[in-house]
Amino acid sequence: MKKLHQLISEKESELQNLEDSLGLGFPIVEQAKMTQISHLRLELEDLRQIEKSIQLNSDQQIVLEWLKEQVSIGNDLQYVLWEFTDNVYEEPAEYSVSEQTKAWLELTEQEQFQVLAAFAEWGNKSNE
């Protein structure tokens, strides 16, 4: 998500620079700039749509924060994932189901993948 946000910022800056330089060149140069500006605007619109679709809902945030917390306190990644899946699919009774388990079970498969992608991105970033 951070890289996408950075890409959007770079494209916005490039667009602003092109718009600021309009009127300073020959007509053919200006026409090329206008074409490039049009393409950048469309590209930015697409990138912003992608960024919006990646936003996590509250159930996804609950699960993501739990996973991050477990790794942050020193638990091994494999153990965290095993513990989480064990809790999700092995809870003995409804009254003992944790908040993150309830949240996970409310997610669609696509939303689950989005949580795992966000967790992987966080893990990669924190290990840099």
Image (cartoon, helix red, strand yellow):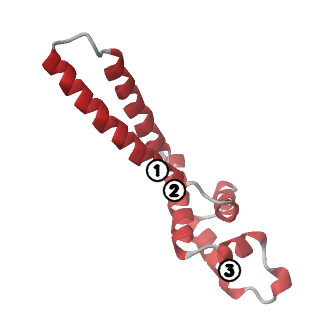
Marks 2 and 1 in Cβ contact (< 8 Å): yes
Q: Residues within 10 Å of mark 3 (few under 14, many from 20)?
A: some
| Quarter residue 27 falls in | top left
Tell me how far mark 1 sits from mark 3, CA to CA: 32 Å
Mark 2 or mark 3, which has the lower sequence index?
2
Q: Residue at x 46, y 45 (%)?
A: 48
Residue 68 vs residue 101, the one in the foreground: 101
Q: Amino acid at mark 2?
A: Ser
Instruction: Identify the disc placed on residue 107.
Output: none
Tell me how far mark 2 sits from mark 1, CA to CA: 6 Å
Single out the mark in the foreground, 2 or 3. 2
Residue 25 vs residue 4, the one in the foreground: 25
Mark 1 or mark 3, which has the lower sequence index?
1
Q: Secondary structure at mark 3?
A: helix
Q: Residue at x 69, y 65 (%)?
A: 59
Q: Amino acid at mark 3?
A: Val
In this view, which residue lies farthest toward the bottom?
92
Q: Residue at x 53, y 51 (%)?
A: 52
Instruction: Identify the disc placed on residue 53.
Output: 2
Q: Amino acid at mark 1?
A: Gln
The residue singled out by tag 3 in the image is: 88
How many labels, in total?
Answer: 3
Q: Secondary structure at mark 1?
A: helix
Q: Quick check: 116 left or right of 24?
A: right
Say above or below: 99 vs 51.
Answer: below
Q: Secondary structure at mark 2?
A: helix
Instruction: Identify the disc placed on residue 49.
Output: 1
Residue 25 position in % (x across, y down)? 20, 12
Q: Residue at x 19, y 26 (%)?
A: 32
In this view, which residue lies farthest toward the left?
28
Q: Residues within 10 Å of mark 2 (few under 14, many from 20)?
A: few
